[in-house]
Image (spheres, rainbow, N blue to C red):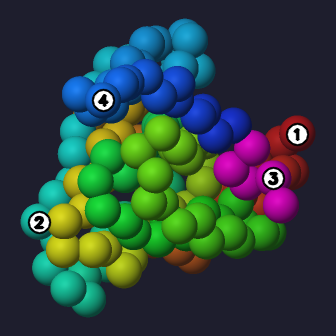
Amino acid sequence: MSIACENPEFRLLGDERGSLIAVEAHKDIPFAIARVYYIFGTKEGVERGFHAHKELKQVAVAVRGSCIMKLDDGSEQQDILMNDPAKSVYIAPMVWHEMREFSEDCVLLVFADQAYDESDYIRNYTQFLEAIEQQGKNT
């Protein structure tokens, strides 16, 4: 399955003192970083996401704990267990994403190529599928 085709794996550095991962735009992240945010303190049973972006590109990494990231491009779906701070998930534009099964200690860090813009969100799954279909007609 090719939904999560560009999953940057970060270079893990460290020694007996501990570990370090440095992340750089255009090197470890395939775009210029305009926004960074993180999700934490998610209560048991809570699911998040349930949207797609028209233009926004994102890279997500569980820097602590774990969760399941579901990606859906309108024709294929993929569940990815996020539980390694050296592995990430690239979320392309027009990919519906949902997160669930957060561990109590999960911290999900996200790098984005644009600042927050509510007009970039598609929050209704039926409208997402319609936009995908329309996009296919225009190509």
Pick whichever of labels 3 and 4 is earlier in the sequence: 3
What amino acid is found at the position of numbered circle 3 in the picture?
A: Ser
Residue 2 is marked as 3
Q: Give the foreground label among 3 and 1.
A: 3
Pick whichever of labels 2 and 1 is earlier in the sequence: 2
Residue situated in front as seen by the camera: 112 or 105: 105
Residue wearing tag 1: 139
Pick whichever of labels 3 and 1 is earlier in the sequence: 3
Residue wearing tag 2: 41
What amino acid is found at the position of numbered circle 1 in the picture?
A: Thr
Q: How far apart are the alpha carbons under marks 2 and 1?
A: 42 Å
Q: Residue at the location (79% across, 69% down)? A: 75
User: Alpha-carbon neighbours of circle 1 within 10 Å: few (<14), some, or many (≥20)?
Assistant: few
Pick whichever of labels 1 and 4 is earlier in the sequence: 4
Circles 3 and 2 in contact, beta carbons < 8 Å: no
Pick whichever of labels 3 and 2 is earlier in the sequence: 3
Q: Is residue 101 magenta?
A: no
- 111 vs 97: above or below: above
Q: Give the foreground label among 3 and 4.
A: 4
Q: How far apart are the alpha carbons under marks 1 and 4?
A: 53 Å
Circles 2 and 1 in contact, beta carbons < 8 Å: no
Residue wearing tag 4: 16
